Image (cartoon, rainbow, N blue to C red):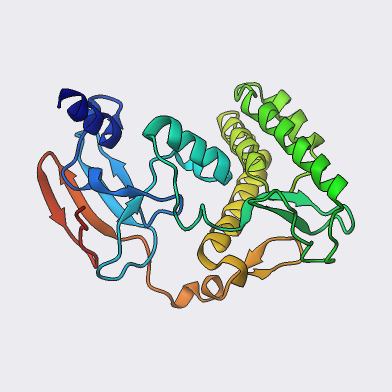
Amino acid sequence: KLQRLVSVWRYNAFSHHRDGLLLYDQTSRCSHSCDPACFYSIGEDGALVLRSRVWLEKGDELTISYLHDQDLLKHTAIRQQKLQHYWRFTCACSRCKLYLKECRGFRCRDCLVGVWYATTANVLEPCRVCNCVPSQDMTEKLIRNEDEYVLLVENLDKTDLPDIETVYIANLIFKRHWFLCVMDTMLWEGSQEKNVVDSTLEHQRHRVEFHESFLAWCREGKEAEPRADGGCQTKRRRLLHKAKPASHKVGCEGGARVASQGHSEWKKK
């Protein structure tokens, strides 16, 4: 019983820089999703505020991400590996079940404009610009290059901006890939600290473009309309000015008190 109690605390608590681990009456019951319906913030006093990322209807499940935002950009195998290691489960959310992996893009070698996106079976889909399909030998070579690049990027020192810049500029293989966004984030943060305006804006623009493409795939799947540069747009995105705001306070917790607000209700498990 003691081991079970410790495990419940360990796997359902939220980290807090001042108070260690905090357990909440309702939010700690939320399931994980790699495309979560909600996000949360924890204040200095330990109060947790839960907000929606999407428009919710009554009865919709409130999911959160157990992973850091940066990890959410990575592809399925890496996300599932982290969740299995730290929380002892294999994620089977709607995003993990997607056949096409929106965060693993390879520059089309034929037109040099479009993107070959990888599938769960490590097969590259035809370029949406020129419809070129890579050969099996080319695909295998690109997947090996991807594995090597993952190790290279994960071992970068985020304080060594010249080294990151060298690796970033040398890339001729990948486009709209998660580890390019990781390097854009490192360079954006470093440029901000050094007050290099042009570089800060450039890498922030790249991050925004990646997130737009990533969110379009998560929300619309293959219904997303391709752009010439390999990105995508959706009818929902074009009509955002007519839509209701998605971010809305769903609930607030502090200790044992819960205040349920907004257009959604807590779902107990």
Q: Residue at point 76% right, 56% down?
A: 115
Quadrant where the N terminus is found in the figure: top left
* Residue 182 falls in image quadrant: top right
Residue lying farthest to the front in this orientation: 1
Give the percent coordinates (x, y) of residue 61. 30, 60
Q: Where is residue 67 in the image (x, y as percent from the top left)?
A: 43, 39
Residue at far right of view: 110
View extreme (left): residue: 257
Front residue of this view, candidates 147 and 216: 147
User: Is residue 236 toward the left or the right of residue 15 in the image?
Assistant: right
In-image side of 238 versus 54 (left or right): right
Please give the count of numbered marks on the rendered protein.
0
**103 relative to 238, above or below:** above
Determine if residue 186 is in view: yes
**Which quadrant of the structure image shows residue 14?**
top left
**Residue 189, position as x, y percentages in the image:** 56, 34
Residue at the (20%, 62%) spot, across then down: 265
Q: Residue at x 86, y 46 (%)?
A: 138
Q: Can residue 70 be seen in this view?
A: no
Name the spot of residue 225 as percent of width and height, x first: 65, 71
Between residues 185 and 113, which one lies in front from this camera angle?
A: 113
The reply, left or right, for residue 41 in relation to residue 177 is: left
In which quarter of the view is residue 18 placed? Answer: top left
| Left or right of residue 185, residue 54 in this image | left
